[in-house]
Image (cartoon, coloured by chain):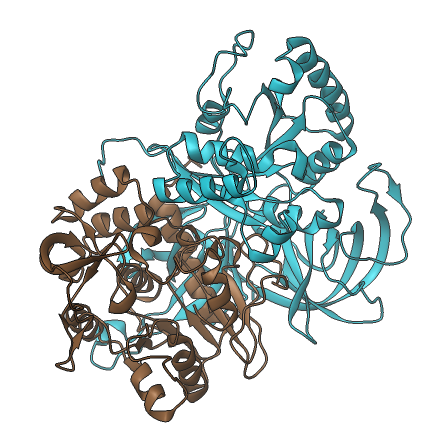
Chain colours: A brown, B cyan
Amino acid sequence: MTQRSTLSHLDWLEAEAIHIMREVAGQCSNPVLLFSGGKDSICMLRLAEKAFRPGKFPFPLMHIDTGHNYKEVVAFRDKRAAELGERLIVRSVEDSMARGTVVLKHEGESRNKHQSVTLLEAIEEFGFDACIGGARRDEEKARAKERIFSFRDEFGQWDPKNQRPELWSLYNARSHKGENIRAFPISNWTEMDVWQYIEREGLELPSIYFAHTRPVVMRQGAIVPVNVPLVSGEVANPSRAGEQIIDLQVRFRTVGDISCTAPVESDADTVEKIVLETATTTITERGATRLDDQTSDASMEQRKKEGYF
Amino acid sequence: MTAQVEDHGLLRFLTCGSVDDGKSTLIGRLLFDTKTILADTLSAIAKTSEKRGMGAVDLSLLTDGLQAEREQGITIDVAYRYFSTGTRKYIIADAPGHEQYTRNMVTAASTANLAIILIDARKGVLTQTRRHSKLASLVGIPHLIVAINKMDLADYSQETYERIKGEYLEFAAKVGIEDIRFIPLSALNGDMIVDRGDNLNWYDGPTLLEMLETAPAAHTEHTEKFRFPVQYVCRPQDSANPDLHDYRGFMGRVEAGSIKVGDAVTVLPSGRESTVKAVQIGGVDIGEAFCEQSITLLLADEIDTSRGDMIVKSSEVPAAVKQIEATVCWMAEAPMDRARTYLIRHTTRDSKAKLAAIDHRLDVNTLEKVPAEKLAMNDIAQVTFKLAQPLFADPYLENRGTGAFIIIDESNNNTVGAGMIL
């Protein structure tokens, strides 16, 4: 037998992610894959194709929509699901607000953390026993300690001090009714790996990942997009009186709820340029762009304990 | 990007040491000097360092994860860190060194191919150094780097370094650890981590990063017997596409060896034989596949196969065993109950199991074998299990993928133990 050469790092990461997705499919009876239209979940769809084609995915796709998502991303989400011929479930934070299960402290409050409520409601509605998500350990310190298969109790809570030991690639996805498992196939990927994978696989992305000009204001040192048109016809992030609106060339490194995702100044208009920019950046992905994580150094851990991804 | 740059794959390693050995500082230093740490993170830890009244930026804060731990000022679980040099990607498993956390170290070691054992130059080889080294060898880590740290507090003395090296080699010979490399370091000042620095000019070996860059990545060393546990069976039965009507793909990851079209294979436990018709990823033919690749196998004959079965080459069929001897690390608060039945998960296969005998327990401090009646949390012991279903196993030291198992308590579904088949 001839010796093989070492797998490239992307091949290794891909093989690991495929293995994890198949473990979910093999061990869980009713999983779902969370798909937001963002870059990480776009990689997840390619990985699912590599894991399960020529068959259909053994799970539907689901998006928890805050109602404050960029139109371009929502359109991309629907287009991609249709191209793949896979079922897409959308559940909306606004429906939870209408039901009264989500109550905003004030009208402008970010709906990002309230996704947890809608997610838990959807899990109950469909009886999902596992959610596959595109979270990565390099994004955030709390995530660095979370298992690849992360057990959540009936309230969706993560208990960082009481995690199941996870050894080798022997994953334990067992749960009782009502509990569920969150599985993170790209736990071991970094932002750079994601971009390299997008480049290698030639994956299509929503346009807002590439440099474009949009109206923004500066708030507390962050670039905040303003007057963003929504699918509903409304406008998110209205500019405040006295603020100076400037047209800036920006791109998004991470895409989520409009109220808490800030772009970075950039002229990178191709994946290749983004890879180069990622290699030379001096600011972390979430540090630059997630307004919600800055509240407290430990805010992600807190959100996860409450059922967040 | 830049496909011209050689890709040396991915290396997973763990760092072992106690809070005081400067382990977090070492990791912080590796991340910092490879420019993995970005400006905003650095300014955040600079602020924290200042708040705590420290003169310089405390790099150990980089790896300091969860709220509870930050309050206690210690690391309590396994955390994973990432950096890349452009030619190789690294995953660091950061495991704490406290005695009561043997299970965390075993966990971190289970996926690592190299371990860095940290020694404080002022203290030399300690009980915990021996414990970490023994655990690393038990879990089958093929390469060890013994890093003699805090050389700045030992006058960068070559004599000190050589003395500790000698002590360690004497111990290693007894334990049977083979591939060991030594390096003097100051993680605090960055000497011999990524840059050589000016303080250790008597040392002419490679820097720590150079050692990591050239260490063999996972699974490149052995030619192994082909082992393919079936994870999932793909049967599209798409009425719109007659080509797929008879498609029956066995999906899994190659746990050892390699496979190509035309190879004669046997499916276990049925023992039915066939040949490989196609090797695919995502429905695309790739002809052959190697260890660690996730693939789909199509066989020439219709053989009833499902998750939990294993496909092997017909010339290399493993034994089906209903009793296993193994080294076990117990991981649950509740001791193992000899009267109870547990679930063993080995590859993609589960079997009910009962403890038949405890041969001995390993005292991780003295490294002596001692008699034992029970298994408590953090205990390591050699035991015998009786199994309800046969497993297709190889000795762990021959192949981790088919030699490892976890023990699950079915009452609460927790993973309560980890085992390595002898």
Residue A279: x %, y % from top left: 27, 39
The residue nearer to you, when weighing A175 against A297, is A297
Residue B63: x %, y % from top left: 52, 44
The residue nearer to you, when weighing B147 against A262, is A262
Residue A38: x %, y % from top left: 26, 63
The residue nearer to you, when weighing B400 against B306, is B400
Q: Residue at x 46, y 65 (%)?
A: A183
Q: Is residue B185 rendered to the left or right of residue A21?
A: right
Residue that lies at the very extreme toward the bottom in this rendered image:
A99
Q: Quadrant of the N terminus of chain B?
A: top left
Q: Is residue B130 rendered to the left or right of residue A64?
A: right
Q: Quadrant of residue A120?
A: bottom left
Kindly tell me whether residue B260 is visible in this rendering.
no
Q: Is residue A3 rendered to the left or right of residue B145?
A: left
Q: Residue at x 23, y 31 (%)?
A: B4
Kindly tell me whether residue A288 is visible in this rendering.
yes
Residue that lies at the very extreme toward the front in this rendered image:
A242
Q: Residue at x 40, y 44 (%)?
A: B41
Above or below, B61 relative to A34: above
